[in-house]
Amino acid sequence: MKAVYFLGNRQIEIREVPDPTPGPGEVVLEIKASGMCGSDLKYYRSAGGADSIGLGRKSAAPVIAGHEPCGVVAECGPGVVGKLARVGTRVMCHHYAGCGCCRQCRTGWTQMCDDGSITFGANGDGAHARYMKVPVDSLIALPEALSFKAGAAISCGTGTAWGGLERLALRGSDTIAIFGQGPVGLSGTQLAAAMGARVIAIDVNTTRLERSAGFGADVRIDAAKDDVVAAILHETGGFGVDCAMDCTGLEDARSHAIRATGKWGRVVFLGEGGMVSIDVSNEMIRKQMTLSGSWTFSRNGQAECARFVASRKIDVDSLFTHAWPLEEAVEAYRLFDNQTMGKGVLIPA
Ligand SMILES: [Zn+2]
Ligand SMILES: [Zn+2]
């Protein structure tokens, strides 16, 4: 099969490699859609490729890229049992592997395995290929109503937004400010609106901001032009938002999220990297603020997100602006790198 590798410094190689064979406890998926995520861009750009900035175990050699896998079960290894492990079943994959025995693995947070995790597409073979070998317990049912593309988005970007909203315990009566309207932030806007919340969307990119209206943003603030905190206070009668979610990883946006959140407010950081400084007394303690970090989602969280999207008929497919055959991965990532597109997906032939 053909498989996409990030070699570092924006170099991509499409290699011909043997089809994977499932071992005990493993299945091989035939990938129908393999999403492109912001983290892939980080891996693509870094000097050492994906593995150089992973948080888990180091891999000995470059791995197949892609960590938003969705497809059908193509082959089951020896001893594999379970309802999902049948050839032809439509599935997503929780894109991590752990020891399976520690407290984190047992609660479905495999990415936090005490023994060091493997992230597919970063330090273990990923989904930018026709076939992908995964542990059977990483399979998540793809509801019949959802497309493979939607399943791919839920496997990281949209699922990460879901995880953040869960951490905030968002209520329909809340007003939430969502910083960054790339694929994760835009998913957050779409999900929060479906949960009944009033959404204030913030971005520096006018195209992204305009798009957010169609995904349920009630108010849009252009951070390149406007005083974000003043605009949010204005929109909330001076009280500030009930909660805020940062999907940018940028210091300014994090600081605005904290300062624009009112008394008893909740803030969650999803965007990775970087720093922020906080006036702890005035901005946190005296406001009784809860500040959390949220890293993707658990296996159950991924399944719950998929069920919510299916039952509310949320159009996750519309996040995607571009689809490419696997062979065009070089062009796909070149364009993605410019950050002018929405979400992309690779479709193996
Ligand atoms: Zn573990
Ligand atoms: Zn991702």
Image (cartoon, grey):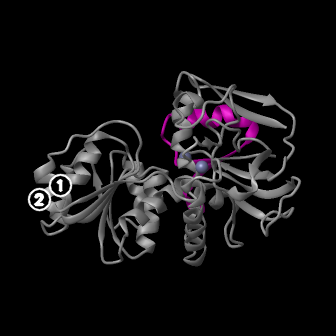
Can you say whether 60 is above or below 158 in the image?
A: above
Q: Is residue 329 left or right of residue 309?
A: right
Q: Is residue 3 left or right of residue 100?
A: right
The Cα atoms of the two marked residues, 1 and 2, are separated by 6 Å
The amino acid pointed to by label 2 is: Arg
Q: Name the residue beneath numbered marker 1.
A: 284
Can you say whether 211 is above or below 311 in the image?
A: above
Which quadrant of the structure image shows residue 84?
Answer: bottom right
Q: Position of residue 324 (x, y in %)?
A: 69, 44
Q: Position of residue 199 (x, y in %)?
A: 34, 66
Residue stretch rendered in magenta on the structure? 317-344
Q: Are marks 1 and 2 in contact (CB under 8 Å)?
A: yes
Which quadrant of the structure image shows residue 204?
Answer: top left
Q: Name the residue beneath numbered marker 2.
A: 286
The amino acid pointed to by label 1 is: Met
Q: Position of residue 345 (x, y in %)?
A: 64, 48
Which secondary structure lies at badge 1?
A: helix
Which quadrant of the structure image shows residue 155?
Answer: bottom right
How many numbered marks appear?
2
Some atom of ligand 2 lies within 8 Å of the CB belonging to the residue at label 2: no
Some atom of ligand 2 lies within 8 Å of the CB belonging to the residue at label 1: no
Front-most of 301 and 192? 301
